[in-house]
Image (cartoon, grey):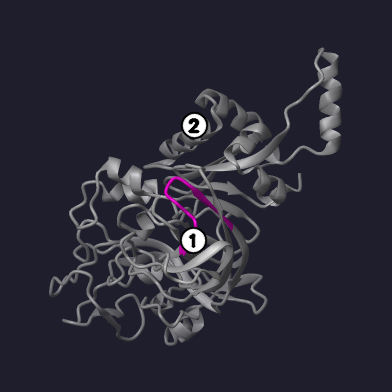
Amino acid sequence: MGEQTCSGTVFVNTFTNGVLDPAKPMLGPVQDGGYIVANTAPGCWGPMITPAIRGGHEVTQPVYVEGAEVGDAIAIRIQSIRVTSIATASGNDQTVEGNFLGDPYCAGKCPGCGTMYPETRIHGIGQSAIRCVNCGADVTPFKFTNGYTIAFDEERKLGVTLPQQAAEQIARDGRSYMATPENSIQNPIVTFAPHDIVGAVARMRPFLGQIGTTPSRPLPDSHNAGDFGFFLIGAPHEYAVTAEELNEAKTDGHMDISRVREGAILICPVKVPGGGVYLGDMHALQGDGEIAGHTCDVSGIVTLQVHVVKGLKIDGPILLPNEEDLPFLAKPLSDEEKRRALVEAAKWGFSEIEETAPVAFVGTGENLNAATDNALRRAAGLLEMTVPEVMNRATITGSIEIGRHPGVVTATFRVPVDRLERLGILSYVREQYCL
């Protein structure tokens, strides 16, 4: 990478095959402080019904960040997110037995000819439309238990779920309606034409379900987190790992945290030279938890700015959400609140209160309890506190929030600024919250 000219802006319109592999070429390098502009492909459902994609998602080819070394971190400012899809489809899933080997997200198998990761073609519309190129068998590893097709207004403010006739119209020209990028190979999920929910109105607030840095060993992209990654432990396919290997390699780029949206700052670990910043799985909207397992996957245009944070060795992401997305107790103290607190302190014989600022520590694990423990341990280790102290601070100055069920959370609370200065991230926190 060092022989290439370092660029202030790197444009990305190419994708992985669903596997984040540190041995594969990266784009760039982009300079420290430079920009990444990407046309992202829909995540989840499209790749899930395209078994040639081996990771359950179709994320962008990673970008090398100049100066990022193992043991550093990369601060990513999400400067803009724009949805380009006109419509999409989604819903709760069920697996199709016989169409995968152990894991339907990353080991698709044709039930007819037995081909692993088979190439496919679209034959008509509906949930049996994805066929194996070799033998013509219905090859999708997933189908809907309950699904919907949703169309977005021109200003991308809201979406409305559609009846059968409209859903089928969209299904016949899926790539166009979903604005699928040219280099994407996924089958558009609108091909299934689901229409179980009609006339529901949903507000749009787009965010990135996948954004982060490349793991230190090949991992299916949707499994670059503690909950989905758990299914790789002892798996019967080529991407199997041990628990130790998973925890050492993963960077928790697959978060599905709705607060990872325009205006937020995400600080990510560097576990391979250059970091390898990638993104994808843009969602038009989602409530906390993504409780249906999936939401409205869309194409879009994203602009990021990246900065290397030297010497900040972290195991998983740190999020600085928009102030309006912070829990009530975690919001920065106002001048009036500080004044009142000092008056109260004076009554009890002391004259100083903590100077604090909000930070969210991402945790992932097999389930929500394990993810919460992971977030608390990560925060405690970085801040040089005990876990019980972090638990107390999260209780009285913050909150535990669900990113994705079953196992992604944020532990958000106000942190003493001297600890943030020691980590080298205080400038980002002050900028984010105008402190």
Q: Residue at x 58, y 73 (%)?
A: 83
Give the camera-side residue of 231 and 22: 22
Residue 204 in view of the camera = no
- Give 205 or 247, whichever is nearer the viewer: 247
Disc 2 designates what residue?
381
Which percent across, then down, holds residue 26? 40, 67
- The single residue placed furthest to the top in the displayed view is 349
> Is disc 2 surrounded by few (<14), some (14 to 19) or many (20+) residues within 10 Å?
few
Q: Is residue 29 visible?
A: yes
Residue at 54% across / 26% down in the picture? 385
Magenta span contains residue 72 = yes
**Residue 106: x, y in percent?**
28, 62
Label drawn at residue 77 = none
Say whether residue 420 is left or right of residue 12: right
Q: Is residue 62 left or right of residue 325?
A: left
Callout 1: SS: strand
Residue type for callout 2: Gly
Q: Quadrant of the C terminus?
A: top right
Which residues lie in the magenta part? 64-76
* Image quarter (top left, top right, bottom left or bottom right) of the N terminus: bottom left
In magenta stretch: residue 100: no
- Asked whether the beta carbons under mark 2 and mark 1 sit within 8 Å of each other, the answer is no
Q: Is residue 390 above or below residue 225?
A: above
Residue with the mark numbered 1: 65
Q: Amino acid at mark 1?
A: Val
Is residue 219 shown above or below 249?
A: below
Q: CA distance from mark 2 to mark 1?
A: 26 Å
